[in-house]
Image (spheres, rainbow, N blue to C red):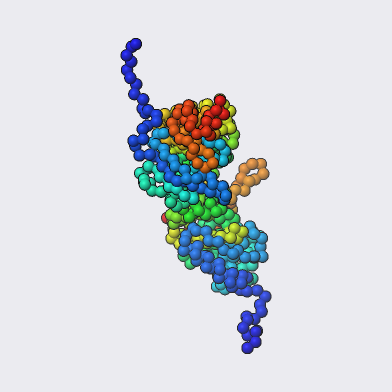
Amino acid sequence: MTARPMTVLPRLAPQLATAAPLLSMRGVAKRYGDVAALKGVDVTVQPGEVLGIVGESGSGKSTLLRAMNLEEVPDAGRYTLDIPAYREKDLFALDRYQRRMLRVREIGIVYQNPHAGLRMRHSSSGNVAERLVVSGERRFGELRRRAKDALIASDFPIARMDRPPVELSGGMQQRVQLAKAIALEPTLLLLDEPTTGLDVSVQALVLDTLKRLQRERQITMVLVSHDLGVIRTMADRVMVMRHGAVVEEGLADQVFQDPQHPYTQQLVHAKL
Amino acid sequence: MSLSALTAPWRAFNYGFLDESAKREIRRKTLKAIAVPGSQVPYASREVPMARGWGTGGLQVTLTLLKPSSVVKVIDQGADDSVNAASIRKFLRRVGAADETLDTTAATLIQSRHRIPEERLRDDQILVLQVPDPEPLRAVEPDISEARHMHADADYGLLWLKLYEQIVRSGRIMEGASYPSLVNARHVISPSPIPRWDVPKLHQADNLTILSAGREKRIYAVPPHTDVAPLVFDDIAFRVEDHAQITCQRSGVKGYFLNELPQAGGPSIHEMSDSHFATKHIQKREGEAVTFADTYYVNGSLSR
């Protein structure tokens, strides 16, 4: 056996929890009328980590993601992000304007339905530039350059950057959303079923892009999906949700190889 | 004491057509609009004998400000002699005993549709602009409640998205009229559909400008000596229409905003949009005594 120089990987996934967690949610609860969508959920995400959230429809995973994106303030709970201006601050207590600015500057999101995240009739580059103008960029040349960079980083065919998303395929629309989400180098990237509804080969390409971005930029991601395959490919750690509560949590491999909770066992076996 | 002693004697209509409570409300809302430059103040837009969309907003403000010593000028796309402008002038004389004029320098109260006169307005003149759509955010935020939040937060980033789209699509800013402008470094207004040519006239003007939308029921104002800055990218300058070097066929004067009149066979001639200003140039050439005020534009470029 020949001795080969050891390559030092930039990061060993997942990091040990020695650093302060980037995201921390405690006791998040939300009711919609009689329905308890979230029953006191705790979430911790380390910097650079990819957290997968699995669960069936109605398990509360999308509500949780909306709370993370500060689109919706839950009835109870505390939410902190480890970023300079907001350290130790409960983000749920921010006012509407602060929430909005925080969302623009620090959080990127990709929705399952591109209509939710994009202006379908504006140009694709304009959609990405929107993020930048809202954050205060007022130079046209700079907007153009940064929009282009973000689209290139999302593997978007740059010749079509001025076409509106309505003329693009589903996979391309997701790339525009992704470019928009990463244009400002967010602290946290939220992915709500980003590949659901795409056909399998396109799904694989979008996941490739996500993996590459994660590797290159070490973006902290929270990925919600009901597709265990997607979670297995992407996530370092997995949270399994059911009826608004977390039933199991652990390293991805561990949860998938050796599920402890009966519901997780069912889920993993159903996947085949 | 009889009831008749307590009530005003019967008259065919109130002075200035609107009843006193309506005028008081509009005065109060106008004062509020002046106090917060550029902020859209809702008001109860009343019925006037004119269809919505023909300048009912402007007319209500004019009627409120009217007094027997007023001298009114009514502009319709720069012209004084359109049916709409002539009818409004006639109406103001009938209900307010106001004098009419075509001359900008002689007017105390100017109601205008889509133009600001070429001659500089003074601090004793009030300009009332008719506004079809007061909301500059309409194109980027169709939800009015959300748009009001955005005004409250001075969150105008999305307007640059609109300009970005125009440059990407057409290579230049295509916003011909209603160019979104920041008033007093706080509120973005749609300065009614005046051409880009007229937007710089609002900046640090000596006169008070009141903008009123009758159908949308909003009053806003640019008080005298207030900053008005058209929204631009830092690296792409604001441009007015390229009219500086074209000569007016009627008066032979150049350097002012023009109407293009297409001719049979393809070519077009140009005529000054501010029609009475052109007329005064003709009168002067024919030896009549006319008074000119300073103009905002001198030799086709803005004079400060």
Q: Nearer the viewer, residue A216 or B254?
A: A216
* B83 lies left or right of A245: right
Q: Position of residue B10 (x, y in %)?
A: 66, 79
In the displayed structure, A106 sits above or below A13; it is below
Q: Nearer the viewer, residue A133 or B112?
A: A133
Q: Position of residue B100 (x, y in %)?
A: 59, 67
Image quadrant where one finds the N terminus of chain A: top left
Residue A26 figure quarter = top left
| Residue at 61% from the left image edge and 68% from the top image edge | B92
In the displayed structure, B117 sits above or below A227; it is below
In the displayed structure, B137 sits above or below B213; it is above
Q: How many marks?
A: 0
| Residue at 53% from the left image edge and 34% from the top image edge | A263
Q: Nearer the viewer, residue B42 or A175?
A: A175
In the displayed structure, B223 sits above or below B156; it is below
Q: Is residue B263 visible?
A: yes
Image quadrant where one finds the C terminus of chain A: top right
Q: Is residue B139 visible?
A: no
| Residue at 52% from the left image edge and 26% from the top image edge | A204
| Residue at 52% from the left image edge and 30% from the top image edge | A265
Q: Position of residue A40 (x, y in %)?
A: 47, 45
| Residue found at the very far top of the displayed protein | A1
Q: Position of residue B261 (x, y in %)?
A: 62, 48
